[in-house]
Image (tube, rainbow, N blue to C red):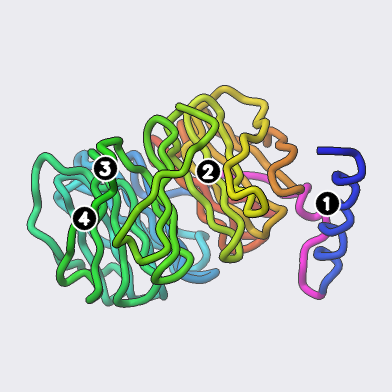
Amino acid sequence: MSRGAGALAWLLLASACQQSGSPTVDELRSGAWRVQPVPSQQDLFGISFADEHHGWAVGDIRQIEGLILYTLNGGTSWSAVAATTELLSDVQFLDPQIGWAVGYAGRIQGTENGGRSWFIQREEHPEETFNGVCFVNRELGWVVGAGGQILHTLDGGMTWQVQASGTSDDLWKIRMVDGLRGWVVGEAGTALRTADGGRTWIRVTTPTREALIGLALVDTSGLFACGSGGVILKFEHERNGWRQLRSGVSDNLNAIGFLSPLVGWAAGSRGTILFTLDGGEHWSLEAVPTTSDLTAIAVAGPERVWAVGRSGTVLRRSR
């Protein structure tokens, strides 16, 4: 990025941060990561916040089956709300009551009471693994997984239809702008795009062969992906293509999330967390009180950025 473009980015950020209620640049920089106590040492793979108070994390199967944790007070305390018989890899809540989780054996489960109880939405298949879930409302949703699998529902998950992805690569994450437009990323630099709700998925060339594991949609138009080997990509609409950004690390990056088009975080192996204030042009390594692999991020606000990972790790970034 040129010196002039960098100065413009900082001016835009400063302007945005001076708006009422918005954090300043110094306030964003002063945030620190702290470990949050949780009632389990099980690996965690997914996290979702419906608002500033209500959040859920899902994970591995060990002594108490598959794990679902929740908080009702913005993460001050976490409880085990429910167990499941399968490892869960991703979770999404639309509001404090309605949510879905997906995982091994083709597991798709839903809840209508904030996770206190769950119902299975699809017959399980032992050979299947679902890695990502995305709903745009209570009816329209997608899941993606191993072997290029994409499923779609029009009725809140009561029935699911297969969509042809055109690839056998494992797919890791899906983000939908609305009921028509969306993206999927996966192994070997795979990026797929749809403009018709997934009736057709089109492969879009990326500048990497590394696995793309994390995907973030920002304000319906900004798009970032991250993956193995420290890869971070940004989709540039003006050139209709992906550009590789310099992360400065070689650790695998498993998750990425943004507060705004300029402010974001990426997390990965050995407790790595990167922070950007200029839309990914520059990344700085943050001090983190863990060396556990981090697997997922949720950005619920400038004071409510979360990361989860191995051995029951839950981190919160705040001032």
Magenta-span inclusion, residue 27: yes
Task: Mark 3 or mark 1: name the one nearer the start of the chain.
Answer: 1
Q: Which structural element holds mark 4? A: strand
Task: Mark 3 or mark 4: name the one nearer the start of the chain.
Answer: 4
Q: Which structural element holds mark 3? A: helix
Front of the two marks 3 and 2: 3
Location of residue 28 with respect to 116 vertically, above or below:
above
Task: Mark 2 or mark 4: name the one nearer the start of the chain.
Answer: 4
Q: Which residues are magenta?
A: 20-35
Query: Going by the image, does 183 lie left or right of 100?
Result: right
The amino acid marked with disc number 4 is Ala
Residue 19 point in image, percent of width and height = 82, 72
Q: Which residue is mark 2?
A: 225
Give the distance between the C-alpha atoms of the residues marked 3 and 1, in whole angstroms.
Answer: 37 Å
For residue 83, the mark is 4
Q: Which structural element holds mark 1? A: helix
Residue 198 point in image, percent of width and height = 32, 61
Query: Going by the image, does 88 lie left or right of 237?
Result: left
Residue located at (76% from left, 48% from top):
278
